[in-house]
Image (cartoon, rainbow, N blue to C red):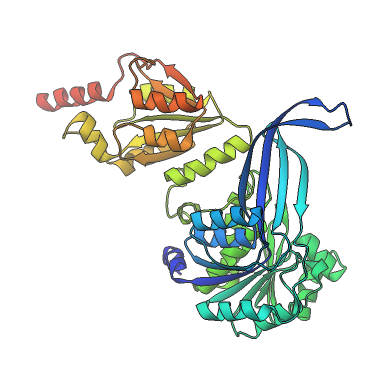
Amino acid sequence: MDIRKVINDFSKKKIAVVGDVMLDSHIHGSVERISPEAPIAVLNFKKEEYSLGGAANVAENINSLGGNAFLFGYVGQDEAKNHLMKILQEKDINNSLLPLFNHTIQKTRVIGNEQQQIVRIDKESGTKIPIGDGEILIKKIMGIDPDLIIVSDYAKGTITQDLFSRLIGLGKRVIVDPKPKNNVDYSGAYLVTPNLNEGIRLTGVNNIDEIGKILQKRYGSNILLTRGKDGMTVFERENVINLPTQAKEVSDVTGAGDSVIATMGLGIVSGLDLTDSAVLANQVAGIVVGKKGTATVSSNELERLVGLENIKIKTLEELKAIREDCRRGGKRFIWTNGCFDILHPGHTDYLIKARKLGDYLAVGLNSDTSVRQLKGDSRPINQEMDRAEVLSALECVDGVVIFPEQNVSNCLRVLEPDAYVKAGDYNSSTMDQEERGVINSYGGAFKFIPIVKNTSTTKIIEKLKRYSEKG
């Protein structure tokens, strides 16, 4: 099957996500002393950030991968609901959330010194949805006629047996991320996706094969058992397929299950079988756990992941997400830029030195149009994608983004790198004043690295011309 066509087909699919809609908040600050009142850390507050959690994160993952999610669930009438609705609007996620809870479900994580989680504060819904109230959600779901339904059950009050039975009665394929303590019978689901701990609690056994077989028989469903660092196992009829993990580095497992079920849903409705969908979901999970916090994967990242595109060539939005991940993890994000028309030792020397200044080196690459504006109609020699491919082959370069402007003020404004590195004879007085203003506005640093003498693209081109003239 043409995987590019499958990914392109994501945009044609409608997936209803029904479940516990949550707001995740992260309170950041510095910890420098212990309270005299009790043996606890004193956090000097810096900022609070909000993101989508639970079923809302599943919906965000679907949209990020290029699909069309429709989110259904319950919220309260409180400030958390206002933050939640604002994010949903910003991310253009279709939703129908009924204000039936006493409180919007919220998880607040307090983080000290950008790395250490000190405490998590959970605010539960405080409400049990009466039998029959699910009928309103069912009518709204029927109104969009989804291609598939994902049930995101966190045992917070949304998924009742009555509501689940009504969802099965719609005759659509239903995928469930289960929660054992909710005691819902998920019979009739097309696929149930517990993690290993949930599988053990649901069955009372700890043998992987037995867990899969028991759950297959109990629910009459296919089973995808996720096993963390050990990958995942697919149980489809008599077939059992083990998939090793794709994660190169585990930074944070928060929301990984949401990413898996979102990818599984999109793969299934786009024509992939269970195994191929699981392979795709396994690769997505490998990216997500390498990011800090609740994270998503874009359709561009997915295409690169499966070998359709260079994984280092990024969009500005993808770099922004990486920048935020670096900030949460206390890592330094470094930026430099240029035309890099013909890569030479001067370029590689300063790029290697730039990478040593931090943990992630992003390189802005002038587009063909902006190179012509800067260098004249005879340039560039190499087209922008060829230049990007060559740059991305360097071990010291972590990400490359092509930008159309003559200066990088917009990139700097979006990314706010810890350091802006320039090569050659630049200094703070000769830099573009707009770029310098952006860096100064948020307290970023300038770094200047002298370029290797007698190396330049212009000299290389002149040399080639002389050779050509000599015949």
Is residue 43 found left or right of 373 in the rendered image? right
- In this rendering, the answer to whether 248 lies above or below 104 is above
Q: 411 or 269, which is in the foreground?
A: 411
In the image, what residue occupies the spot 11% across and 24% down? 470
Q: Is residue 420 visible?
A: no
Q: Quadrant of residue 189?
A: bottom right
- In this rendering, the answer to whether 1 lies above or below 114 is below
Q: Is residue 448 visible?
A: yes
In the image, what residue occupies the spot 45% across and 20% down? 446
Q: How many marks?
A: 0
Q: 271 or 16, which is in the foreground?
A: 16
Residue 397, percent from left and from top: 47, 34
Residue 259, percent from left and from top: 61, 58
In the image, what residue occupies the spot 72% across and 72% down? 159
Residue 45, percent from left and from top: 69, 33
Q: 104 or 65, which is in the foreground?
A: 104
In the image, what residue occupies the spot 55% across and 81% down? 142
Residue 141, percent from left and from top: 57, 77
Is residue 43 found left or right of 49 in the rendered image? right
Q: 371 or 223, which is in the foreground?
A: 371
- In this rendering, the answer to whether 25 lies above or below 104 is above
- In this rendering, the answer to whether 381 lies above or below 264 is above
Is residue 93 found left or right of 401 in the rendered image? right
